[in-house]
Amino acid sequence: MKTRIILVGGFLGAGKTTLLCESARMLSEQGKHVGLITNDQASGLVDTAFLERSLSCVTEVSGSCFCCNFNGFVEAISHLKAKGAMEMIIAEPVGSCTDLSATIMQPLKQKFEEDLIVSPLSVLVDPERLNAILKGGASGLHESSAYILQKQLDEADMIVITKIDLLTSDELETLKRCVAKRWPLAKIFSLSAKSGEGLDLWLDEVTHSTVAGTHLAEVDYDIYAQGEAVLGWLNTTVTLKGHSVNWDTFTQKVLKSLAERFDALNLTVGHVKVLLEADKKYNIGNVTGKSETLSVRGSAGSGNQAQMTLNARVEMNPAALDRIVAEVISKVCGNEIAQKIEASKCLQPGRPNPTYRYDYVV
C-alpha cells in the first residue's frame, strides 16, 4: 500500500500545528491511519510535545530542516510506516523554509514514486501578513523574512488563507480575488482551524489530488539565508516547583510579560509557544505577533510541580533572546516558584544547504 505524503508549509505563526492536529483528528475519525512529522532546527519542540498528547504516531526531524536533511526526513517517513499500515503522513516543515518544491517535492516524486503518493504543496498564510505582502509591505517582518514568505506563496500548489474567523465575508472574498490574481497557478482555500470552517474542503482536496509540485520558485539563497539569520531561535525546557500554583495563570503571565517586553523593544515576533504540563494535564499558549495575538487553551490546573517547554522565534540576537526569556521566567516565578533549566538551546540558523535542489519539475 502506498502512503500519501501531505506537506503543509507556511511562515511562523500561520497556524500549521493547529491545522495538523485538527486534520489528523478528522482523518482518524474517518478510520484513516495518520502519522505526523514535525521539524525544527533544535530539539525540544512544543509542537511535537503537543501533538504527541493527541496522537500516537508523531515523530520529529530536529537539528536541521527537511530540505537540508532530506535523508532524515525519509527516515522519519520510514519510522512511521514501520509502526503499521500508514495511509497518510502529514509533515510540517520549519516555518522559515522555502524552495520546498525544488528540494522536497521533486525528489519525493522521482525517488519514491513506487512507495509514496505526493499531495499538493499547501502553504498557509494568515490574513494580516497576506494583506501586507499583497500591498508590497512586510507586515513588520525584516524585508528578507518577508521575501521568504513571498517565495513560499510563489511555489505553492495550494494557498490556504487561515484564521478566517478574524475576517468578514466581504473581506475574505476580496482577499481571495487578490490572491488568485497574484498567484494564478495556485488553488485558493480558506479555513479556520479554530472553528473548523472550510477545513473539510481543503482536507478533501489535499487527500485526493496527485497534482503536486507543479512549479518552482526562483529563490535567491543569499536573501533566503539572511531572512532566516535575522531570527533568534530559542528552545528551552524548565522544571518548576512551588506550592498550589495555578499553572494556567503562570503560563498567561509568562506569555503576557514576554509579549509586552518584545512590543516595548519594537521587535517582530515569529512566534512564542509554551506547553506546560502538570500531573498529566496541560495548557498550551502562543504569541504570533503583538501582545493582542496571545492565546492560551487547555488547563494544567493547580499543583506543586510542572514542566514547561518554551520555543521563541524573534527578530533579534539569540543570546539577547535567551537573556530576556530567562529574566521574564525568573520574574514571574519570584520567590514562590523554584525553577531548573533541564535543556536549552539558542541559535541563528545557518545558510540553507539542501540535499537536493531540482531545476525542473518531475
Image (cartoon, rainbow, N blue to C red):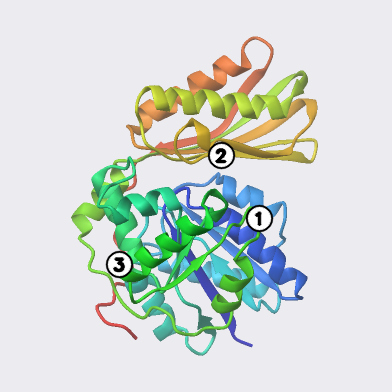
Crowd tier of the residue under label 3, counting other residues whose Cα lies within 10 Å: few below 14, some 14–19, many 20 or above: few
- The label shown at residue 195 is 1
- Of badges 1 and 2, nearer the viewer stands 1
Q: Position of residue 198 (x, y in %)?
A: 60, 66
**Label 3 amino acid?**
Arg
**Label 1 amino acid?**
Ser
| Quarter of the rendering occupied by the N terminus | bottom right
Residue 215: quarter of image: bottom left
Q: Residue furthest bottom?
A: 114
Q: Position of residue 270 (x, y in %)?
A: 42, 42
- Of badges 3 and 2, nearer the viewer stands 3
On the image, numbered disc 3 is attached to which residue?
182
Determine the secondary structure under disc 1.
Answer: loop
- Residue at 53%, 58% in the rendered image: 169
Pick the residue in front: 236 or 75: 236
Earlier-in-chain disc, 1 versus 2: 1
On the image, numbered disc 2 is attached to which residue?
286
- Residue at 40%, 85% in the rendered image: 110
- The label shown at residue 248 is none
| Quarter of the rendering occupied by the C terminus | bottom left
Check if mark 3's residue and mark 1's residue have beta carbons within 8 Å: no
